[in-house]
């Protein structure tokens, strides 16, 4: 069991620490969706001159978790019905063909969706001839852990991402909508490193009382 958890943590750390953009897709979406994600990743990588990894996860729920709970992926290819049933949880970049949508996590840089959106309307370019190196945008495919496993939380980054995470904890753990002063307080705690996302999510802290059991 310890070995399994170690593998999960190492995978998560590799994915989060990588300077590349991570695009998540669910195995339940089918082989065609996974191939489409890989093609889209190449096109995004070529446009941005940044590697884009495709992270294949067990199901759509885990895709959402990697996107919004753990901030381990910036983008995802998911079914439109899944997005419609979770209004406000995703930043919709645009349609990606069929019933699929390309979405981003809440709080990502506004420039990224704007740079990617035109690619969804453009026709894919022809693949590079065999034997020639790909541009700098080439990424890789990463098979994620089973649905029962979860990655470690990524470190706090932007204020917008941390604000969204605080709201996420309130919705998922307390089933409440947080007051602005609570969001401001816990966002500042995350930004200053006084509390981690894992501690906040595990309820080691008491969000409504602005206190933590470890201090």
Image: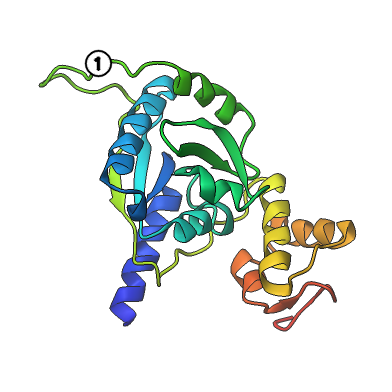
Residue 158 visible in the picture: yes
Residue 195 visible in the picture: no
Number of labels in the image equals 1
Residue visible at 30% across and 50% down in the picture: 142
Q: Position of residue 47 (x, y in %)?
A: 42, 20
Front residue (pair 19, 129):
129
Q: Which residue is mark 1?
A: 126
Q: Position of residue 168 (x, y in %)?
A: 68, 60
Q: Position of residue 123 (x, y in %)?
A: 37, 16
Front residue (pair 75, 155):
75
Q: Is residue 203 left or right of residue 112?
A: right
Rendering colour mode? rainbow
Q: Crowdedness of circle 1 by 10 Å Cα count: few (<14), some, many (20+)?
A: few
Front residue (pair 78, 71):
78
Compared to residue 113, the image places residue 72 above or below, namely below
The image quadrant that residue 110 belongs to is: top right
Q: Position of residue 183 (x, y in %)?
A: 81, 58
Compared to residue 137, the image places residue 107 above or below, namely below
Residue visible at 41% across and 34% down in the picture: 98
**Element type where label 1 sits in the image:** loop
- Quarter of the picture containing the N terminus is bottom left
Compared to residue 77, the image places residue 68 above or below, namely below
Residue visible at 46% across and 60% down in the picture: 62
- Quarter of the picture containing the C terminus is bottom right
Q: Is residue 195 left or right of residue 53?
A: right
């Amino acid at each position: 069991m310890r070995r399994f958890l170690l593998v999960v943590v190492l995978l998560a750390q590799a994915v989060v620490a990588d300077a590349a953009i991570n695009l998540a897709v669910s195995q339940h979406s089918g082989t065609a969706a996974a191939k489409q994600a890989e093609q889209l990743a190449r096109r995004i990588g070529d446009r941005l001159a940044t590697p884009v990894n495709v992270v294949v996860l067990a199901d759509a729920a885990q895709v959402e978790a990697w996107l919004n709970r753990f901030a381990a992926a910036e983008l995802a290819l998911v079914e439109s019905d899944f997005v419609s049933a979770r209004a406000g949880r995703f930043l919709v970049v645009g349609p990606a063909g069929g019933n699929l949508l390309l979405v981003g996590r809440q709080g990502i840089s506004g420039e990224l969706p704007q740079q990617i959106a035109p690619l969804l309307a453009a026709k894919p370019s022809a693949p590079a001839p065999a034997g020639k190196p790909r541009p700098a945008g080439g990424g890789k495919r990463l098979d994620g852990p089973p649905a029962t496993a979860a990655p470690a939380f990524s470190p706090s980054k932007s204020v917008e991402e941390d604000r969204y995470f605080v709201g996420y904890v309130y919705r998922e753990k307390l089933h409440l909508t947080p007051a602005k002063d609570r969001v401001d307080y816990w966002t500042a705690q995350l930004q200053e490193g006084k509390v981690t996302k894992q501690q906040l999510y595990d309820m080691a802290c008491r969000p409504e009382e602005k206190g933590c059991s470890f201090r």
